[in-house]
Image: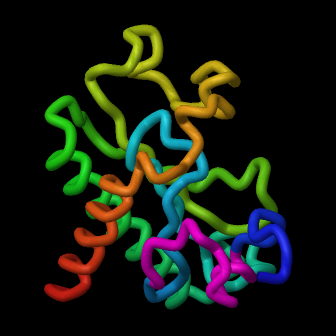
Amino acid sequence: MTGDWRIDRIRAALRGENPTVLRRLTSGFAVIGDVQFLPGYSVLLVDEPDVQRLSDLPRAKRLSFLSDMDQLGEAVERACLRLDPAFRRVNLEILGNTDPFLHAHVWPRFEWEPADLVGKPVWLYPRERWSDEQSRLGPQHDAVRDAISGELDRLRSVA
């Protein structure tokens, strides 16, 4: 390892040093999120570190990224459906307001979420949920990590 992989997640993934990588996809990397207060939260990272916006990619690569986002979303959906009967849906987002590289968020949503948040954007969750120790990615999330990885493998084998 050449340092903290969080400083440059994409280059760390390209070097094989980003421990959150689930699978290499056509246009980037499927990674499990650093926080798991909604178990299964994942992110698609583009494989070009200097790309900031979807529109920075040539059309073919742009469509590939969107297809990979769809594939990761479906994998998260299938895994969460199998692991939690209270799974509701997946939300897909490309925001880019904080991190200066193209990435897409894949948020599973559940019936057990607080009533005042279940129908709202995940970004409205209290700040402490984002940093609480129980939510931090760790071995307790291996089952959801393995389930998403397995679903990605299944989806890619039928493509």
Establish if 8 lies above or below 111. Answer: below
Q: Is residue 69 left or right of residue 80?
A: right
Residue 13 forms part of the magenta stretch: yes
The percent coordinates of residue 78 (x first, y second) are: 20, 56
Q: Is residue 134 left or right of residue 92?
A: right
The percent coordinates of residue 2 (x first, y second) are: 83, 82
Q: Residue furthest top?
A: 116
Q: Quadrant of the N terminus?
A: bottom right
Name the residue at 49% across, 34% down. Answer: 37
53 or 136: which is nearer to us? 136
Q: Is residue 50 left or right of residue 96?
A: right
Q: Quadrant of the C terminus?
A: bottom left
Name the residue at 45% across, 9% down. Answer: 116
Name the residue at 41% across, 50% down. Answer: 141
Q: How many marks?
A: 0
Residue 26 forms part of the magenta stretch: no
99 or 60: which is nearer to us? 99
Please tell me in which quadrant of the rendered image residue 88 appears.
Answer: top left
Q: Is residue 127 left or right of residue 61?
A: right
The percent coordinates of residue 96 (x first, y second) are: 71, 55
21 or 94: which is nearer to us? 21
Q: How is the image coloured?
A: rainbow
The percent coordinates of residue 46 (x first, y second) are: 61, 77
Name the residue at 63% across, 19% down. Answer: 126
Q: Which residues are magenta?
A: 10-24
